[in-house]
Every structure is written in structure tokens, then in C-alpha cells.
Amino acid sequence: MKKILSSLLLTSTAMMMFGQVIVSENFSTLTPGNLGTQNSWATSGGAATDYQIATIDAAHGLSLTTTSGNGYVATSNPNNRTAARVTTVVASAANNIVQATADIYTGSSNGAGEYRFVVVGTTGTTTVAIGGFTYNVTTKKLNGLGTFYNASSVPTLYLAVADASAPVFPVNTWVTVSYTYNKTTGAMSWSWPGGGSSVTTDPDQITGMVAKDIYLQNLTATGNTVNNTVGIDNILAQFGNSATLSINDVNTVSANKRSVISIYPNPTSDILNIKTDSKINAVSVFDMTGRKVDVKLNDTQVDVRSLPAGSYLINVETKDGVSTEKFIKK
């Protein structure tokens, strides 16, 4: 059943399978239970039982699920989970495009965190996540990821689409995504059901990044208290060129990359630090009833000592837009 559905999917999206395959994985030949090292997969973080080969629904058959820890730590977070296919495939001279597609299962989690499907490689001697997708389990929004130069010419991972334009996909939903990167031009594109986005002329785009591996990351965020379980299936990553790879025509939204914002420590009893590559224009904090509370901002530090203990939402406004994070005041 899975193979029939996969064939129909690929036919309907007009993808031509003449590329140089890096990873092709639908998990159907793996043994149910712990993923372990089956089919050359490697895992990092948590226990073997956090990476399961299991049937999510009959249509997909066996898939991979990962389950995060039920907490969050700002440094070396032990709640994060990573599954990776590290490969030795090298693109031929004619293949200057990498394309990665997958079916992402959003799961039923209501915690704080994100699930990433990314192409990992190098720019020069630096290892980077070249690009891919992230699904936010709190907001249920899907967004593209891409590495661009920041203002200091350092390769930095950005979200590709402003929050207001990012599509929402509900719990327990399969979402088919596709990402491409052209190392000759630095152009990137992201597509999802009903839409997509692309970057072709950004002055900060990076040429020459070398794609190597596929990483699946289940990452917790500030304020998380539950185990987040998500799934993936039908992974296909391949090298090709404009003649061998077909990219869908989609209704695109303007790419508006923004830096990934993080806050720490969390929980905190006094000062909340904001990490971002962009200048902070303003912050606002709300309690869980929606009431705005007063805080003091000093550069990248927010003084929350006056707040009662509890959970809060902080809105951080930069030139890239507004990002919302959850934190706990001890």
C-alpha cells in the first residue's frame, strides 16, 4: 500500500527521478521497534526507545517517530533528539542542485519545541545546516530554514518566511515538503501543500555549500514540560540539475528571512537574555491570561525580577518581525 501511494505522490508532483540519490528511505524494510543503527541511521540524545520504527497509519505503513524529553535546558539540552543519515555520496560535476523531500507527521504534542528536517553540509571547512524545514509544535506553523550570511558575513541559519505568512498545519497531520538548494547561484526554494517560497537574488545567499547528510531533529524550547512526538516518512534526497530535477509550480509567498531568536536561562528568577543577530526594537511580556505586564529592557537583557512566579510569553520585535517565546519566572 505504501509503495503504491508513494508512486502516486511522486507522479502527481511531477518529480523526475533521474537524480543522484543521497538518501532514499521509507522505513518499510526496517524492523519495528528501536531504530538503532538500522539502514545506517545514527542517533544522538535520549534512549534507544525514543527513536521508533512504527506504524502511524495504514497508508504510510512503517515510519520513524522520535520523542523528545519533557524539559528544556539552555545549554547542551539533554531533551533534544537527533537521527541522522551520514553519507559519502559526492555530487557529480553536472549536479549543482540538491533536493530533499519528505512527509512530516505533526503528531499530537502540545509542548514547546520544533521538529527539523534539514540537509547538512559544509561551507568551506564549517559544518552547517544548509536548509530544510522546521515545524513548531506550539504554534503549529511550518517554516523554511536556510543558511545565509549575517551582517558580519558569518553563515547563519534563518527562518525563510515571516510568521504571518507561515502556513499552519494541525496536529496528527501528514505534510509533504520539498527543499532545494542551487550551489552555483545560492538560490533556495521551499514547497509545502498549497504553497511555497523561494530566494533567488538575496545579497546574503551563499554559493558553493556542499550537501552531505540528512538530519532529523526533535528540539525542545523554553518552557517545555512534555514529551513531543513527531514522525517522518518517504525521505528522498538527491543531487541533480535543472534538467533532471523538476520543481513544482506553487503559489509562493515572499521570502522574508529572519534570525532565529532564543532566550535563556529558562526558567529564570531575575534576568532573561535574548540571543538574536538582529537589533531588538522592543519587547513585550504577557501572562497566560493575556494581560500585559511591565518589564525593563536593557540591550539584550530583560529584567523580570518584579514578576510573580509563573509562565509568560515574551514578544521580541526586530526588523525581521515579531517572535514569541514562552518562559518561566521562578
Image: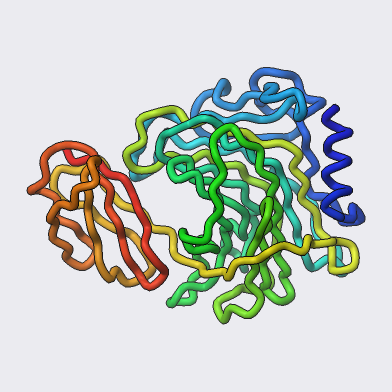
Give the position of the C terminus as an image quadrant. Answer: top left
Q: Position of residue 293 (x, y in %)?
A: 15, 52
Residue 238 seen in render: yes
Quarter-of-image position of residue 201 = bottom right
Which of 157/212 is in front?
Answer: 157
Residue at position x 75%, y 29% in the image = 60
Q: Position of residue 179 (x, y in %)?
A: 69, 57
Residue at position x 11%, y 40% in the image = 308
Residue at position x 57%, y 37% in the image = 106
| In the displayed structure image, the side of residue 60 where residue 263 appears, left or right | left
Q: Position of residue 35 (x, y in %)?
A: 66, 26
- Location of residue 45 with respect to 57 vertically, above or below: below
| In the displayed structure image, the side of residue 285 where residue 235 appears, left or right | right
Residue at position x 71%, y 53% in the image = 178
- Location of residue 9 with respect to 171 vertically, above or below: below
Give the position of the N terminus as an image quadrant. Answer: top right
Quarter-of-image position of residue 102 = top right
